[in-house]
């Protein structure tokens, strides 16, 4: 697939969702900083991305030292630890990140993320369920 114009990306939280975001971006030739609190997750993605770092996304100093505010796009892919997801979103927005995309586990979680400044909030299961149903209902339409 064609390489898109160069941007820099940070992905925080390397579970299934964040890992998939990392892989897609790197497959498209983009620079990716991958961050997780868990060493095993970081070691898994380190060979794939530009830089992989063990850090706690709720540690403001650590996020500042990693210059999260200077990234074009920051993905917060922490779901179950809602407190960490909300705090990380607030921190990276206050550091100046222009485009922060967050994963939410529930509609209420999504509302809180919007309130603290998330630019885009996705609920993967809900969004994918809609897309799968749309695809069955309208098979002749090109779905993205
Ligand atoms: P997925 O569905 O994407 O696999 P999950 O719902 O099973 O994710 P989550 O709790 O959303 O699990 O965590 C996703 C990743 O975020 C994990 O790899 C976890 O180690 C990481 N993570 C959780 N809290 C923090 C934090 N404070 N700082 C950085 N990474 C974190």
Image (cartoon, helix red, strand yellow):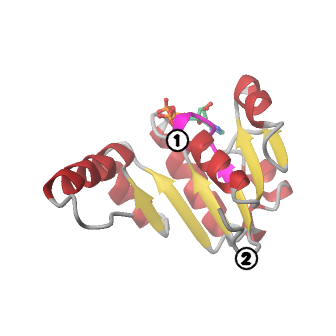
Q: Residue furthest front?
A: 140
Relative to residue 120, is residue 92 drawn left or right? right
Q: Residue at x 21, y 58 (%)?
A: 139
Name the secondary structure under disc 2: loop
The mark closer to the camera, 1 or 2, is 2
x, y percent for residue 29: 76, 60
Residue 7 in the image: state x and y as whole percent: 74, 71
| Residue underneath mark 2 | 5
Q: Which mark is residue 17?
A: 1
- Please report the bounds of the magenta region as a residue range: 11-17
Residues at marks 1 and 2, CA–CA distance in whole angstroms? 23 Å
Pick the residue in front: 132 or 31.
Answer: 132
> Does mark 1's beta carbon lie closer than 8 Å to ligand 1?
yes
In the image, what residue occupies the spot 26% across and 48% down?
132
N-terminal label among 1 and 2: 2
**Mark number displayed over residue 49:** none
> Looking at the image, which is closer to me, 65 or 4?
4
Which quadrant of the view contains residue 44?
Answer: top right
Instruction: Give 117 or 127, whichever is nearer the viewer.
Output: 127
Dividing the image into four quarters, tell me where ligand 1 lies. top right
Place of residue 136 in the rendered image (x, y in percent of width and height, measured from the top left): 18, 51
Residue at left 81%, top 62%? Answer: 67
Could you tell me which quadrant the C terminus lies in? bottom left
Q: Residues within 10 Å of mark 1 (few under 14, many from 20)?
A: some
The quarter of the picture where residue 46 lies is top right
Residue 117 position within the rendered picture, expressed as x and y whole percent measured from the top left: 49, 68
Residue 118 falls inside the magenta stretch: no
């Amino acid at each position: 697939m064609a390489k898109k114009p160069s941007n820099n990306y940070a992905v925080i939280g390397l579970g299934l969702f964040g890992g998939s975001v990392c892989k897609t971006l790197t497959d498209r030739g983009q620079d990716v900083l991958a961050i997780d609190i868990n060493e095993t997750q970081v070691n898994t993605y380190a060979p794939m991305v530009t830089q992989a770092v063990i850090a706690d996304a709720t540690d403001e100093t650590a996020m500042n030292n990693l210059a999260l505010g200077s990234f074009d796009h920051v993905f917060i892919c922490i779901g179950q630890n809602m407190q960490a997801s909300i705090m990380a979103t607030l921190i990276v927005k206050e550091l100046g990140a222009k485009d922060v995309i967050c994963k939410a586990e529930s509609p209420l979680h999504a509302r809180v993320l919007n309130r603290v400044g998330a630019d885009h909030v996705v609920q993967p299961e809900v969004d994918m369920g809609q897309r799968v149903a749309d695809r069955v209902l309208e098979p002749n339409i090109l779905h993205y």
